[in-house]
Amino acid sequence: MTLQTIADRVGVSRMTVSNAFSKPDQLSAALRERILTAAQEVGYVGPDPAARALAKGTTGAVGIVLTSSLRFAFTDLVATSFLGAVAEELGPTGLSLTLLTSSDDGAIIPARDVAIDGALVYSCDPTSTAVQLLTRRKLPLVYVDQVPVDGIPAVNVDDRSGARAAAQHLIDLGHRRIGLLLSGLHGRHGLVTAADLTVEGHASTQRLLGWRDALDGAGIDPVMARQGGADLEQAKAGARLLLDRPDRPTALLCFSDAVAYGALRCAEDLGIDVPGQLSVVGFDDNPLAVQIRPTLTTVRQDVQAKGRLAAAALSRAIQDRLAGRPIIAEHSLLPTELVVRDSTAPPAAG
């Protein structure tokens, strides 16, 4: 079945049939209904999407470049919330979402080979070649939780200010022995010092800077542990390095709420009371923060707003590219807020 089949059946031109599917506002409601009814009767579902994309010079899809594993998009509560907001914002535009890993192994390299009109680069491994490949394809890009660069729209949260507030909260409570629980793919793992610490990614860098702003100002030298990921077992292993020792910290600052959850479970395994013997602070304020016990003191970022802003910026960039207009590379910085709950308290006497 083709456009011509339906055109002959209804007695109109091929272009009129095409408009019934792709430009319905150019037909009367009655004529469009006749065409769609005829198409349904003969089992015609519409113009071939690949041919239509070739004719328009667009794919109707945008990519979201994640870490090396797509599992992150379905298991991390912050990522799923972000993706939901992106999908909701893009819904009225007709653009669909394609999840891409930043992996460059194997014969298929998603950033190079998948047909898309543009991409969100979201919390992507900075050592990956994915961003370079997308840039060489001259696709519209929007950076999210990445280091901003000139010429590319970017959406970030004020990680540094939020982390500074979290550290200052512990200092104001009276804590002086404070541990930092970090994560990252590359570099040294386990107990680390400032000299051998690898910090990768924009959010990690900014949060560490914020913590050190407050800690350095108070003359506090934190003990630090770093693990390769943020799943429960990895976070528990990193927390145990800080807590299963005679000089354990009285408080922990964690890279994320997921990492903080691992710290809470480790403390439970070791018989350490939170917040009586240990205070724990997370970052993100994901739904987990109010579901666990004790409820988690954390830094709130507006993930929904971040997703909507990023999707709107990418949609504008694609339209500007199609219209031959220069892309407006606006850099947005969303505020953060310290949320104090039950996992923090003054240190125990002595």
Image: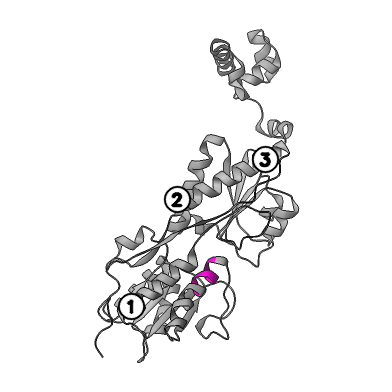
Question: Quick one: SS at disc 1?
Answer: helix
Identify the amino acid type marked 1. Asp
Asked if residue 176 is positioned above or below residue 281 in the image, the reply reads below
Queried whether the magenta region covers residue 324, the answer comes back as no
Identity of the residue drawn at 51% across and 74% down: 209
Disc 3 versus disc 1: nearer the observer:
1
Asked which quadrant contains residue 270, the reply is bottom left
Identity of the residue drawn at 47% across and 47% down: 85
Identify the amino acid type marked 2. Gln
Queried whether the magenta region covers residue 204, the answer comes back as yes
Residue 44, can we see it? no
Please report the bounds of the magenta region as a residue range: 203-208
Say whether residue 286 is left or right of residue 274.
Answer: right
How far, Cα to Cα, is label 3 from label 1? 49 Å
User: Which one is earlier in the sequence, the residue at label 3 or at label 2?
Assistant: 2
Residue 172: mark in rendering: 1
Identity of the residue drawn at 66% across and 60% down: 149
Quadrant where the C terminus is found in the figure: bottom left
Residue 335: mark in rendering: none
The residue that label 3 is drawn on is: 320
Disc 3 versus disc 2: nearer the observer:
3
Asked if residue 172 is positioned above or below residue 18 in the image, the reply reads below
How far, Cα to Cα, is label 2 from label 1? 31 Å
Residue at the far right in the pictured view: 136
Say whether residue 298 is left or right of residue 190.
Answer: left
